[in-house]
Image (cartoon, grey):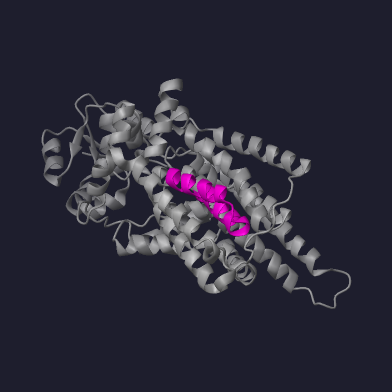
């Protein structure tokens, strides 16, 4: 029988202590400054998916902004601890912390303690992982369940135990309840199983236990349907062809550029990203030569997800593949080890290839930690979006006869529904002219300007031609700077 993972070994006391330290440090980094202002998506989650009664939460799918498993857990958290950013974001933080030791165990399944520990250490201090662990959405839950299901499937390939397939089915269904991207991950795993059958023939675990393998995916599908059954009509209606307008902003090119901008925040510069890409490529090649099924289980879901999203003409957003961050770290660290070993001639006596590989892993880990730690102050200094401060600024600055207004859904929901301000919503340039007719100043707040520029070009032009920029409130969300303009 072909082996795709390493045989499990007993966990040493030193490993337990190491993971305990990472969990404590990781929890501290993810709780620190977690009380900062909510951003648009979190506000919509709170209003539409967390505050309603629990029965409505599990029977209603308001939009793809709703991540049902997260909504249920956040509802319990908010009910227990009160409505606050901490209570709303607590489930994301807990899943984020839990992912740290889980990544180590995934790493131990496919590589040695050094690379597994280095990946978990980098994840602990990762700017992007900390950011999403303080984001009241289901992405860290999806990441956790993708890693857990992948580890379970890897163990089944190694041992053939049905208990691993049960864990796979349950974790896959829970992951899909957190975010439907998990369905695509599951389909990619099925494709990897077919690959392993073809690649290894009769030696494949899938060939020997194909009924068990198929049953796991059927079970995952049935559980997923069961979780979504109370809201199945809403879900099917939302994802039916033509049910929602195509997003003109979140195009493939926009996603690539947004991903590069986001990576530069966490990794420093384009050169660092390029070096990481080279190391990643070397790691893929190394893993594929040794454990092709394992590396496909970890990585195939990313291109498969992006391909399906493009074919279905759905918005493409970098956060859809956050679930692969841990796998990416493991593969990149393997690339560093591979290149390090390759730099040493076989006849070299003073430095072995193993020592060179270790040195490269240590250097990469140290460099990644330095860059990540340097990036953290940005995430802590600024909130994701600061609607409270922006609204307070306008209210303190405007005159008694002045008018406060918002433009766009992404400003209207936070200001009008969440903060409860009786401001005017401007939807056409003619409204702006009407508000300015009596000579009063009009103070306009908006955010995610690319959506206004694309969807309301005439209003966008009027805002820039007739109104002067007053202040911007920087946020860490891509494109989420809140702008304030005054129209004389």
Please check the rendered image and state whether residue 152 is part of the magenta-colored stretch, yes or no.
yes
Vertical position of residue 136 compared to residue 186: above or below: above
Task: Tell me if residue 386 can be seen.
Answer: no
Foreground pick, 169 / 452: 169
Is residue 38 covered in magenta?
Answer: no
Quadrant holding the N terminus: bottom right
Residue 355 in view: yes
Residues 392 and 454: in front is 454
Asked whether 206 or 458 is in front, the reply is 206
> Which residue does the image show at 74% across and 70% down from the upper left?
341
Query: In the image, residue 229 lies at what x, y percent?
Result: 30, 41
Q: Position of residue 140 (x, y in %)?
A: 49, 43
Position of residue 112 measured from the top left corner of the image (x, y, whole percent): 71, 57
Determine the image quadrant of residue 397. top left
Q: Quadrant of the C terminus?
A: top left
Q: Which residues are magenta?
A: 146-175
Residue at x 52%, y 66% (from the top left corner) = 207
16 is higher (above) or lower (below) than 88? below
The secondary structure that dominates the magenta segment is helix
């Amino acid at each position: 029988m072909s082996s795709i993972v390493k045989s499990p070994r007993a966990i040493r006391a030193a490993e337990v202590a190491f993971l305990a330290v990472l969990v404590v440090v990781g929890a501290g980094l993810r709780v620190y400054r977690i009380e900062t202002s909510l951003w648009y998506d979190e506000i919509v989650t709170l209003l539409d998916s967390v505050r309603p009664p629990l029965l409505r939460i599990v029977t209603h799918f308001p939009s793809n902004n709703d991540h049902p498993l997260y909504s249920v857990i956040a509802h319990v958290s908010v009910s227990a601890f009160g409505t606050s950013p901490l209570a709303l974001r607590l489930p994301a933080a807990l899943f984020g912390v839990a992912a740290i030791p889980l990544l180590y165990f995934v790493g131990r399944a496919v590589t040695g303690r050094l690379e597994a520990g280095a990946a978990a250490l980098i994840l602990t201090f990762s700017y992007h992982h900390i950011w999403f662990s303080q984001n009241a959405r289901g992405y860290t839950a999806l990441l956790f369940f993708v890693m857990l299901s992948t580890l379970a499937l890897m163990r089944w390939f190694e041992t053939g135990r049905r208990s691993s397939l049960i864990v796979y089915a349950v974790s896959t269904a829970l992951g899909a309840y957190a975010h439907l991207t998990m369905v695509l991950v599951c389909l990619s795993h099925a494709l990897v199983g077919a690959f392993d059958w073809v690649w290894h023939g009769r030696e494949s675990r899938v060939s020997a236990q194909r009924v068990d393998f198929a049953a796991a995916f059927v079970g995952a599908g049935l559980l997923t349907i069961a979780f979504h059954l109370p809201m199945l009509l809403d879900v099917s209606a939302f994802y039916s062809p033509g049910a929602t307008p195509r997003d003109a902003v979140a195009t493939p090119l926009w996603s690539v550029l947004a991903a590069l901008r986001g990576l530069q925040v966490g990794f420093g510069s384009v050169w660092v990203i390029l070096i990481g890409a080279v190391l990643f490529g070397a790691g893929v090649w190394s893993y594929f030569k040794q454990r092709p099924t394992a590396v496909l289980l970890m990585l195939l879901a990313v291109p498969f997800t992006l391909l399906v999203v493009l074919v279905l003409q759905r918005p493409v957003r970098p956060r859809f593949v956050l679930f692969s961050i841990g796998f990416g770290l493991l593969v990149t660290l393997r690339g560093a080890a591979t290149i390090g070993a390759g730099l040493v001639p076989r006849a070299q006596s003073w430095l072995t290839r193993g020592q060179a590989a270790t040195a490269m892993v240590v250097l990469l880990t140290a460099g990644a930690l330095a860059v990540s730690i340097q990036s953290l102050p940005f995430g802590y200094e600024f909130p994701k979006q600061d609607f409270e401060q922006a609204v307070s600024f306008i209210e303190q600055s405007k005159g008694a006869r002045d008018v406060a207004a918002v433009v766009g859904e992404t400003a209207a929901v936070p200001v009008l529904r969440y903060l409860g301000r009786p401001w005017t919503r401007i939807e056409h340039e003619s409204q702006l002219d009407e508000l300015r007719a009596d000579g009063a100043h009009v103070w306009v707040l908006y955010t995610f300007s690319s959506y206004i520029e694309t969807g309301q070009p005439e209003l966008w032009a009027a805002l820039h031609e007739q109104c002067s920029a007053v202040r911007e409130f920087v946020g860490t969300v891509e494109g989420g700077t809140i702008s304030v303009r005054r129209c004389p």
